[in-house]
Amino acid sequence: MDAHNRALAFLGGVPARLIYDNLKTVVDSVFTGKERKFNRRFLCMANHYLFEPVACTPASGWEKGQMENQVGNIREWLFTPLARFAPFTELKGWIATRCKELAQRSRQTKSQRTIAACFAEEQPLLRPVTTSFDGYGR
């Protein structure tokens, strides 16, 4: 829940739908096709932010596009060499700074626009975050 709050704050808004690869913290049961039983607390968060959660079909890599490849790239860019931090809060701040730096990199396309420039075109389509979701249910 905290990762969603931080990601949506970083992005500056909420997309209409978010796609998930059936992670156990989000999906309680996988049924046929795209039918899922989502975790109750996760659905509360989706309702709070008003996004549609969409689950990938198992063993259907084409649904994820280049996502898995990009996750590997970002891990390499962020954590090579391995960063070490004593307090967890320092790590969170360092990651936020590195993500902003990485957004200035050129995309691997013919246009050579930065990730930040591409995002600037899409950001107006996001709904604003009015309040963060309390994942602890206080």
Image (cartoon, rainbow, N blue to C red):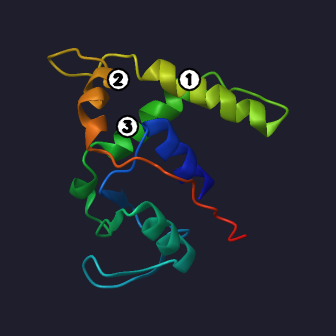
Q: Indicate the amino acid at tag 3.
A: Gln
- Occupied quadrant, residue 98: top right
- Residue bearing the label numbered 3: 70
Residue at position x 39%, y 50% from top? 14
Of pointers 3 and 2, the one earlier in the residue sequence: 3
Of pointers 1 and 3, the one earlier in the residue sequence: 3
Any mark on residue 98, and which? 1
Percent of width and height locating residue 47: 44, 70
Any mark on residue 2, and which? none
Viewer-proximal residue among 79 and 52: 52
Any mark on residue 116, and which? 2
Foreground tag (1 vs 3): 1
- Occupied quadrant, residue 125: top left
Q: Distance of mark 1 from mark 3, alpha carbons?
A: 15 Å
Percent of width and height locating residue 122: 25, 36
Q: Secondary structure at mark 3?
A: helix
Q: Indicate the amino acid at tag 2.
A: Ala
Q: Which residue of the protein is positioned furthest toward the front in this rendering?
A: 130
Q: Which residue of the protein is positioned furthest toward the right in this rendering?
A: 86
Q: Secondary structure at mark 1?
A: helix
Q: Is residue 39 above or below residue 49?
A: below
Quadrant holding the C terminus: bottom right
Percent of width and height locating residue 101: 49, 18
Residue at position x 59%, y 59% from top? 1
- Occupied quadrant, residue 89: top right
